[in-house]
Amino acid sequence: MDRHRSRGRRARPVRRTSLLCTAVASAVLVGVTGAGTVYVQAHAHDGKGLVSSASSASALPSASSSAGEEASVEPVAEPSVDRDALLAKAMKKAMKSLTVADGAKVSVAVLDVGSGESAGYGDGTFDTASIVKVDILAALLLRAQDADRHLTVQEKAYATTMIENSDNASASALWASIGRADGLDAANKRFGLTGTKGGDGELWGLTQTTAGDQLTLLQQVFGDDSQLGSASRDYLQGLMGKIATGQRWGVSAAADGTRWALKNGWLPRTATGLWDINSVGRVTVDGHDYLVAVLSDGNSTQAEGISLVEAASKAAVAAFQDSGEK
């Protein structure tokens, strides 16, 4: 079991591609055509994440234009598909077929690796439970890189059982090796996580995080623009692709067959009897790779939490298979 004594309860904002009318906007000059058209990159922020769209505006005639010549105006670019709205729609549909406890919460973040588009649903912070084991190993690998060394035989043994079998004793050993919460927080600062805080003392499973931060961490594990070198990334990815049979649930439900790499976390709360159920990883669907992070708490049972996380994972992928056309 994936247990810690519970006591008590933030991602770098996920970049969105949807065009939001109510956002605060600013404009940056991108270029000027010979006809005097100023191409502008409009940026907006709605409190959830930065979005942008290209448009053009008329400038004063260039020096080569006659005094009476009117500057040409290019058509404004069409708004991009609102993936957040599509994800919300897919989640609403998915929730209709689920048994969800009153007060249960779920938050989802997803990235289409090919297009670079992302989407999010829900917010707030959650206890990591065992998904933090990916973060612990990433922090250890970063420390090893800094010291220009390989992991020891013992560290590799701990890493294997910690990720593949979700072994808690191995996680505690490596948690100590990285300097517990201080070491995790220092690594996460370099990884770009802004809403994650390591658990107190030995309570690594009570590390607090957000779905957006977990998506950022997945980009460090699976993306080329990473603080981790290719060998470190390959190593972590390999372990996440060999999860023990009984733990192959969660984001893998959205994948084509066995084309996934993941880490799950499950934690029964001693005070309430409710469950935290989380899942993070990469899935491949119809030849497209997606990074998906789903966090939840307040589930009545482990089974109900797993059903919620798997439905949310499928909804995350569905948001990119829907063109948004009516």
Image: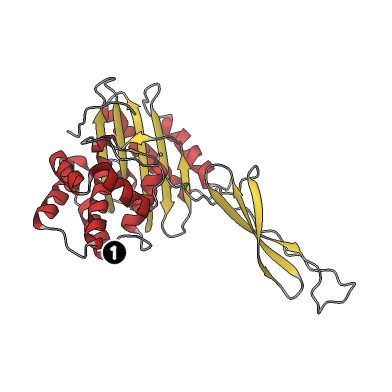
Q: Nearer the viewer, residue 170 or 115?
A: 170
Amino acid beneath label 1: Gly
Q: Nearer the viewer, residue 180 or 286?
A: 180
On screen, 313 above or below 220?
above
Residue 28: percent from left, percent from top:
65, 60
Taking the image as shown, residue 142 lies to the left or right of residue 33, namely left
Q: Is residue 250 visible?
A: yes
Residue in view at x 41 percent, y 37 percent: 107
Residue 165: percent from left, percent from top:
16, 44
Q: Nearer the viewer, residue 261 or 68?
A: 68
Q: Within 10 angstroms of label 1, few (less than 14), some, or many (20 or more) residues?
A: some
Residue in view at x 58 percent, y 48 percent: 325
Provide the residue designation for mark 1: 229
Residue 175: percent from left, percent from top:
20, 44
Q: Which of the 4 image quarters holds residue 198?
A: top left
Image quadrant in which the C terminus is located: top right
Residue in view at x 55 percent, y 42 percent: 47
Image quadrant in which the N terminus is located: top left
Q: Which of the 4 image quarters holds residue 94?
A: top left
SS for callout 1? loop
Q: Is residue 285 visible?
A: no
On screen, 175 above or below 270?
below
Residue 112: percent from left, percent from top:
43, 54
On screen, 23 above or below 138?
above
Q: Residue furthest left?
A: 153
